[in-house]
């Protein structure tokens, strides 16, 4: 009986404590101009022989890599990926005795480049297109050092939650107490901001815009009285 009474008393105390809390969420958001771009480009070629298709794409890819090296892009910022080779088959015409066969091969190779100097974006694009790059899978913008902005967003999120809690406490006629718990719910560093562009020669107009770094928190405050 004593154990049961103590357990019931503990549950009552826990319920009372839970009722004397204010739970709020806060959001912090910081906008910043990107300082890095990632290009995904490459070469594609078709030929009757598989080896010739691969050779053509390899030649173009090597010229692209050489040009990027001459432009001062560090090796750590250049990566080849997506090498592929596939057969090309003739179109099958329904109602005929033709058997679809291989008429050639298509090869492709991709290069991913990080540019840490956005002012050189147009220059680099122009150079690699001149060297034969004929595929462009995308351009994205990012931040080299997002941590300081992330920390600023977190501080804003906590301040936002505090302001809400104080408002609710004042409206309810109670005094806000100490923080009971704080949980980061989401937000984080910005994902890559995608931009569209064409492979046209000459100056390529690209607007980098801004990136949002956000943080979301949930804070539980004690009600002091």
Image (cartoon, grey):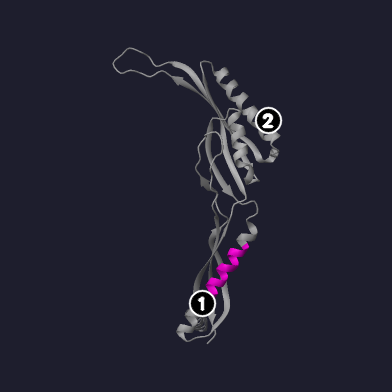
Q: Nearer the viewer, mark 2 or mark 1?
A: 2
**Quarter occupied by residue 114:** top right
Q: Nearer the viewer, residue 147 or 31?
A: 31
Q: Is residue 130 above or below residue 147?
A: above
| Residue under numbered circle 1 | 165
Q: Residue furthest left?
A: 95
Q: Residue at x 58, y 40 (%)?
A: 39
**Magenta span:** 151-165
Report helix, strand or loop for mark 2: helix
Q: Residue at x 66, y 41 (%)?
A: 77
Q: Out of 94 and 182, give the one closest to the viewer.
A: 94
Can you tell which mark lies on residue 28?
none
Check disc 2 and report the residue beneath it.
66
Which residue appears at 47% of the width and 79% of the height? 168
Q: In which quarter of the view is residue 95 placed? A: top left
53 in relation to 147, above or below: above
Q: Is residue 101 magenta?
A: no
């Amino acid at each position: 009986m004593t154990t049961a009474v103590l357990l019931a008393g503990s549950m009552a105390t826990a319920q009372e404590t839970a009722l004397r809390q204010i739970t709020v969420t806060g959001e912090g958001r910081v906008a910043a101009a990107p300082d890095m771009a990632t290009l995904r480009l490459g070469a594609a070629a078709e030929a009757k022989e598989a080896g010739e298709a691969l050779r053509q794409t390899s030649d173009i890819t090597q010229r692209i890599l050489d040009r990027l090296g001459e432009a001062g892009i560090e090796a750590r910022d250049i990566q080849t990926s997506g090498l592929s080779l596939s057969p090309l088959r003739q179109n099958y015409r329904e109602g005929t005795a033709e058997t679809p066969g291989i008429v050639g091969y298509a090869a492709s190779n991709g290069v991913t480049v990080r540019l840490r100097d956005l002012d050189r974006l147009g220059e680099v694009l122009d150079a690699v297109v001149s060297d034969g790059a004929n595929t462009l899978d995308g351009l994205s913008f990012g931040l080299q050092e997002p941590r300081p902005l992330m920390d600023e967003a977190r501080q804003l999120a906590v301040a936002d939650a505090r302001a809400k809690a104080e408002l609710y406490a004042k409206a309810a006629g109670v005094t806000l107490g100490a923080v009971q718990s704080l949980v980061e719910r989401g937000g984080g560093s910005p994902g890559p901001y995608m931009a569209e562009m064409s492979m046209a020669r000459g100056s390529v107009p690209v607007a980098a815009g801004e990136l949002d770094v956000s943080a979301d928190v949930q804070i539980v405050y004690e009600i002091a009285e």
